[in-house]
């Protein structure tokens, strides 16, 4: 016992000595720095590493993107690309009618835009609806609540490529589902080779993969609603539906807005899952904006950096509008 | 407190000094002290023969060459022993073979080379993607005449004399012979049309219960041969691409029939935006006939083994004759290499007749080297299916139309290949009508050519 105490106190002493040394060395370093630049400038020093990473890996590529969007030619190097002004944007918008992609010079771009709009509207609606229902259920005192919370969150932990491949193996022509269907004596189903079904499954897979994340956010929002309000409502004779519409929804609205905007932003940027799942097919039925940009900028043998950059700026514009709309909605809510 | 601060500063200073400590000086030999000459008797003069003056060769700096490579089958396994042999003969040169997926060669390598981060050599298929980036071998190889004499001029010209074709490929169909035998249907020969083959394959599939009758790889390269056989003139005399020709229309219409009648797997053309091969279906016994090419021979030999008998049949005939499309990969050297002499040595080694022949024999590939083709290749196989396939594809070579040979070396061939696959997929899925598909495809090719400065 005494020996154990001695060993314990030895290690405690060593660790205390090391931590004292580190703290003193750090104190010495930052104390000196503070004397040089002043207390008010110290926060900038602490955010500098993060700013550097942000500048190099995010801000600089964004600025380069502007250069590509307003220049042309096949060269990769910005200084070898001639300035073309708005030509890349004009090429994207050269249409008789943007509602009829066949009338457009870049018809694939407009198909991607329409597909993305369709995806955003339906995917976000379904996502929020299912996430809300799941959060409401998980907020109740049910058996194995902890287990179910993990189960619904688990798909979020998977890589999008893994999610896409698993579902592809299940839904492809000779996949698991068709194997069961044919085993039951029916004709196999064109899950991924029919345009409408492909769009449907892309949305379902995307909802399944991401729902858990938004469920957790909504669950946190539900748990922040005071239980007293429900008790008071119950005493006043309010039924479940009234409690839900008059208490839950209004108080959950700020959290819902966050969920809606986050899911909108993610939906506009959909790529990994769909690229691995359907590759944009059949035809261009599930080809979305980011894949269009990727194809033009990276995978095409004749890379068109200017058009790809212009398309990405247009997409960024949409995302900025969405974010500003969310800020405006939040401001109104707080008034 | 002051003592503690001092100790900390001292420790930090020590760490800094240790980091900046100069390297230990190299051990020098102890100076030789000449001994005093000993007194001797007068020596007897004997004339000694003059020793030859030995000139020591200057020390050669070791060189590492990076060789980016893709493989359809066992090409990398065949290439490595050749590289080992080269390195044994040239101990100062190390060659690192980086085997990567084809998609990396197709999408990433051009950007790497353009930004100066490319390898010294690579195996490629899109010759035009590296325009202006090749190392002119005529200026560095020991025997430029040998190089220019033994490879087809259009190909090495398309490579800007920066490489050589390591294989000659030809497109053509494979069939599952065992299924034909089981269905008791005679395999037709030369002169059969695509429509006749479609009907036969359908009959065999129905009789034997095979899932799919027929298929073709998802690329304009494979579509071009049948289209030309049906009378398409894809490349005119001026080298201009024209897709709206009767033969192209006819074949794409036939392709739609395959799709609509379920003769071809829907996923082959409709799922994914990259190249899909029908060879996987025929290898698994789920397809009767697959239009692909000669580079699949060693894959078929290895993967099918003796599961069933297979063979290559002549390219079906049409209004334009019977033709496949020539193609093939090339091993190229890039101008950005820091070691042009070493690269030249390696290239000369690889295209030397003995080594080129060994590569062809091991990979079961048709040779593009004239000397090797004339001498014949002792292919490493006794497999009758493989030998038959090699003979069949060799017999296709003289039938190739000029445009079929010129297509793959055309500077904008890949603009046609990739865009035609995507547009045909839109037509097959019903997104576009035939006329819309042809208009859009022509527009895509024209835009790509204009964008590339063509």
Image (cartoon, rainbow, N blue to C red):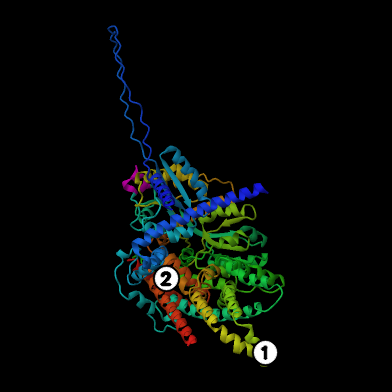
Residue A306 is left or right of residue B216, and the answer is left
Q: CA distance from mark 2 to mark 1?
A: 74 Å
Contact between labelled residues 1 and 2, with CB atoms less than 8 Å apart: no
Magenta segment, which residues? B137-149
Q: Residues within 10 Å of mark 2 (few under 14, many from 20)?
A: many
Task: Judge whether residue B301 can be spotted in this image.
Answer: yes
Residue A19 position within the rendered picture, expressed as x and y whole percent measured from the top left: 51, 55
Callouts 2 and 1 on one subunit: no
Residue B364 position within the rendered picture, expressed as x and y whole percent measured from the top left: 52, 49
Q: Nearer the viewer, residue B260 or A67?
A: A67
Residue A327 position within the rendered picture, expressed as x and y whole percent measured from the top left: 45, 81
- SS class of the residue under badge 2? loop
Which numbered marker is on residue B49? Answer: none
Residue B212 position within the rendered picture, expressed as x and y whole percent measured from the top left: 61, 67
For disc 1, the marked residue is A234
Which numbered marker is on residue B243? Answer: 2
Residue at x 65% of width, y 89% of height: A232
Q: Quadrant of the C terminus of chain B?
A: bottom left
Q: Quadrant of residue B38?
A: top left
Residue B33 is left or right of residue A243, and the answer is left
Q: Nearer the viewer, residue B12 or A321?
A: B12
Chain containing mark 2: B
Q: Quadrant of residue B401?
A: bottom left
- SS class of the residue under badge 1? helix
């Amino acid at each position: 016992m005494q020996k154990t105490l001695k060993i314990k106190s030895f290690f405690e002493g060593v660790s205390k000595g090391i931590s004292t040394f580190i703290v003193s060395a750090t104190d010495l370093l930052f104390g000196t720095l503070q004397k040089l630049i002043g207390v008010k400038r110290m926060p900038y020093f602490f955010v500098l590493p993060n700013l550097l990473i942000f500048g190099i890996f995010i801000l600089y590529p964004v600025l380069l993107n502007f250069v590509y969007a307003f220049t042309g030619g096949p060269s990769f190097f910005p200084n070898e690309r001639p300035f073309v002004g708005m030509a890349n944007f004009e090429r994207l918008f050269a249409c008789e009618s943007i509602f009829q992609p066949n009338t457009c010079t870049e018809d694939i771009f407009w198909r991607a835009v329409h597909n993305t709009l369709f995806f955003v509207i339906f995917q976000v609606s379904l996502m929020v609806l299912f996430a809300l229902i799941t959060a409401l259920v998980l907020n109740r005192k049910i058996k194995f609540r902890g287990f179910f919370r993990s189960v619904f969150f688990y798909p979020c932990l998977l890589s999008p490529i893994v999610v896409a491949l698993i579902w592809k193996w299940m839904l492809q022509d000779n996949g698991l589902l068709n194997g069961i269907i044919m085993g039951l004596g029916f004709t196999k189903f064109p899950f991924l080779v029919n345009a409408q079904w492909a769009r449907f499954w892309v949305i379902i897979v995307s909802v399944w993969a991401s729902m858990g994340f938004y469920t957790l956010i909504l669950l946190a929002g539900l748990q922040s609603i005071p239980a007293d309000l429900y008790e008071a409502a119950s005493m006043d004779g309010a039924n479940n539906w009234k409690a839900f519409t008059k208490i839950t929804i209004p108080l959950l609205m700020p959290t819902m807005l966050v969920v809606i905007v986050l899911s909108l932003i993610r939906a506009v940027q959909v790529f990994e899952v769909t690229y691995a799942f359907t590759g944009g097919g059949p035809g261009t039925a599930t080809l979305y904006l980011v894949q269009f940009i990727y194809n033009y900028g990276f995978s095409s043998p004749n890379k068109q950096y200017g058009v790809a950059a212009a398309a990405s700026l247009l997409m960024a514009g949409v995302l900025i509008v969405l974010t500003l709309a969310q800020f405006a909605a939040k401001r109104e809510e707080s008034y | 407190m002051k003592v503690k601060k001092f100790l900390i500063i001292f420790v930090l200073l020590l760490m800094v000094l240790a980091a900046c400590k100069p390297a230990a000086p190299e051990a020098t030999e102890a100076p030789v002290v000449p001994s005093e000459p000993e007194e001797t008797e007068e020596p007897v003069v004997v004339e000694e023969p003059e020793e030859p003056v030995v000139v020591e060769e200057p020390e050669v700096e070791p060189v590492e060459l990076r060789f980016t490579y893709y493989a359809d089958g066992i090409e990398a396994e065949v290439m490595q022993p050749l590289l080992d042999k080269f390195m044994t003969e040239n101990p100062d040169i190390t060659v690192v073979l980086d085997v990567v997926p084809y998609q990396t060669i197709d999408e990433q390598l051009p950007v790497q080379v353009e930004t100066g981060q490319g390898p010294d050599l690579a195996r490629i298929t899109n010759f035009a993607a590296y325009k202006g980036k090749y190392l002119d071998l005529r200026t560095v190889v020991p025997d430029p005449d040998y190089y220019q004499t033994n490879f087809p001029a259009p190909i090495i010209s398309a490579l800007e004399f920066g490489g050589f074709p390591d294989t000659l490929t030809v497109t053509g169909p494979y069939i599952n012979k065992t299924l034909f035998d089981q269905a008791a249907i005679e395999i037709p020969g030369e002169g059969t049309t695509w429509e006749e083959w479609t009907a036969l394959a359908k009959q065999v599939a129905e009789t034997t219960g095979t899932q799919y009758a027929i298929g073709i790889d998802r690329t304009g390269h494979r579509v071009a041969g049948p289209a030309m056989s049906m009378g398409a003139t894809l490349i005119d005399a001026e080298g201009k691409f024209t897709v709206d020709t009767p033969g192209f229309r006819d074949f794409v219409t036939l392709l739609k029939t395959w799709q609509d009648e379920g003769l071809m797997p829907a996923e082959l053309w409709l799922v994914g935006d990259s190249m899909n091969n029908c060879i996987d279906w025929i290898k698994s016994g789920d397809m009767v006939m697959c239009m692909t090419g000669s580079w699949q021979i060693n894959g078929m030999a290895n993967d099918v083994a003796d599961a069933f008998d297979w063979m290559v049949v002549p390219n079906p005939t049409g209004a334009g004759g019977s033709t496949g499309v020539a193609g093939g990969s090339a091993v190229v050297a890039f101008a950005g290499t820091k070691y042009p002499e070493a690269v030249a040595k390696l290239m000369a080694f690889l295209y030397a007749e003995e080594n080129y022949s060994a590569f062809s024999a091991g990979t079961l590939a048709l040779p593009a080297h004239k000397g090797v083709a004339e001498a014949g290749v002792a292919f490493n196989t006794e497999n009758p299916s493989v030998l038959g396939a090699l003979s069949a594809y060799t017999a296709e070579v003289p039938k190739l139309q000029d445009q079929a040979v010129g297509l793959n070396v055309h500077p904008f061939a890949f603009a046609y290949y990739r865009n035609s696959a995507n547009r045909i997929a839109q037509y097959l899925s019903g997104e576009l009508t035939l006329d819309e598909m042809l208009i859009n495809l022509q527009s895509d090719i024209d835009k790509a050519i204009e964008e590339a400065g063509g």
